[in-house]
Image (tube, helix red, strand yellow):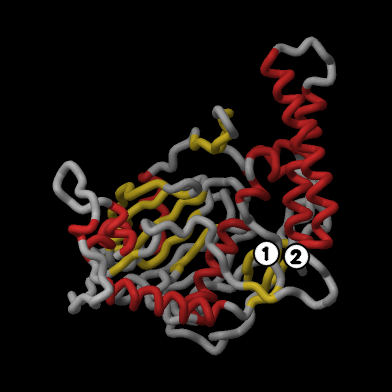
Amino acid sequence: MQSLESQESQFHGLVWEERLFSSEPRWIVEPDTGAIKQTVQSLRPSSKVEVAFLAQGGFNKIYNVSIDDEAFIMRISFPVDPRYKVMSEVATMDWVRRTTSLPIPRVIIHQPSRDNPIGFEWMLMTKLPGKPFGEIYQSLSFNVKARLVRELAASSVCLFRNQLCGNIYGKSSVVENITSSEQILRPREPVDPKISVLVNESNPDGSSTSMGKSSEPPFNLPDKGSSEGASPDVGRIVSMQFFWDSHIHQHVYRGPFRSSKDWITARLLFNENDCYSALDKHSAGDLDSDDEAEVEDATRTLQIIKNLKSLIPLVFPTDDDGPEPSMIFNHDLSRHRPLTTQYPQERPRYSEPVPESYEPEENGEPYELYFEHL
C-alpha cells in the first residue's frame, strides 16, 4: 500500500479552500520559471530558450516557451488527479488529432511524474495560431459562424466511435509505487521514438532522459500514423466530480463505466459519502445554528439520493449487456476555449439579425443578445 507521506507528496502545492457554497482549489506553490527554462534547455542544450507566464486556468498554468525564436507552450498541471490527468490529456489530444481534421496541438514531450526540477507534472506542446473565439465572435459574419458549426459537427461525428464512459489512455502498464494491484494506463509516446530529438529511454525513477541536439526546427513532428481512426483505450475517469476535494481519496469506482447507469450511480455515491461525513462531523452534539443547518441539509440530501436511486432503473434501463456508445465531451467548452484564425469576410445572409432591432448599450453598441443571435 502507498504510504500516507507518499500520497501527500503527490498533492503538494494544492489546498482546498472552503468558500460560501463549496470548496475551491488553490495553488500554494508556484512553478519556478527558472526550473522550466532549465528543463527545456536540457532538451535543447545549444538553443536559446526563453520562458514567460501566459495564463492560468482552473487546473493548469500556461507558459510561453521560445526555442530559437520558435513558439511552444509549456502546460504545468495542478495535482488534482496525479498522473492520470496528464497522461489522459496527452493520449486524448493525440487521438483527436489522428481521428479528426481539427487543428490540435502536438505534444512534444510530457512528464507524468512530479520527480523533476519543475516539481509538477507537465507537457511541452506546439503553439497554435489564433485568438479565443470569445474575443472575435462579434466581428464574424453569420456565414462564418455557420461554417464553424458545420466543421465542429463533422468532427463530432468522427468522435462518436467510443465505447464506455471514462478517459482515453494509451498502452496499459503497471506503474510502480502505487496502490496495490492498481493498474494505470500509460499513453503512447506522442512522437515517433525513431526521431533523434525524442526521448528513447526513461530513468529508473520514471523521469525522462534529456534530448540531444538536432537540426532545425527545434522538434521534428510526425504525420498522422497508422493508428488514425483506431478506437482508443478507455480507462478510469478524470472528472471534477471524481477528484474534487476529498473525492479523490474516497474508495469509489472510477470506471471505465459500461453504462450511464453505472456512471450516475458512482456520482451519487460521492454525494452520499459527503452527507455521511457531515453527519459524522457533528455526531458529538453541541451544535450551533450553522452546524444544525449542515446536519439538516445532509439529512435532506440523503433522502433525495435515496429517491434518485429508486428512479435509476427507470431512467437508465439496462436491457443490453453491451457498453453504451459514447463520444468525447468537454464540460467546460466555453466560447473562450477554441482558437480561431482569420476568416474572410463574406456577404451576410438575408436572415442575419438587424442591430437596430436591439436595444443599444450605453456605448452605442448593439445589445449583447444581438451578437448571440448572430
Disc 2 is placed on an element classified as loop
Q: Which mark is residue 286?
A: none
Residue 288 relative to residue 215: left or right: right
**Which residue, given by chain and number where applicable, does mark 1 sit on?**
166
Disc 1 is placed on an element classified as loop
At 70% across and 43% down in the image, what residue appears? 247
Residue 208 relative to residue 334: left or right: right
Mark earlier in primary sequence (1, 2) = 1
Q: CA distance from mark 1 to mark 2?
A: 6 Å
Q: Nearer the viewer, residue 36 or 190?
A: 190
At 23% across and 50% down in the image, what residue appears? 359
Q: Nearer the viewer, residue 12 or 208?
A: 12
Q: Residue 210 at what x, y percent from top left? A: 46, 63
At 34% across and 78% down in the image, what residue appears? 147
Q: Residue 176 at what x, y percent from top left? A: 73, 57
* Quadrant location of the C terminus in the rendered image: bottom left
At 45% across and 80% down in the image, what residue appears? 195
* Residue type at tag 2: Phe
Depicted 5 relative to depicted 310: above or below: above
| Res 256 seen here | no
**Which residue, given by chain and number where applicable, does mark 2 sit on?**
257
Q: Quadrant of residue 140?
A: bottom left
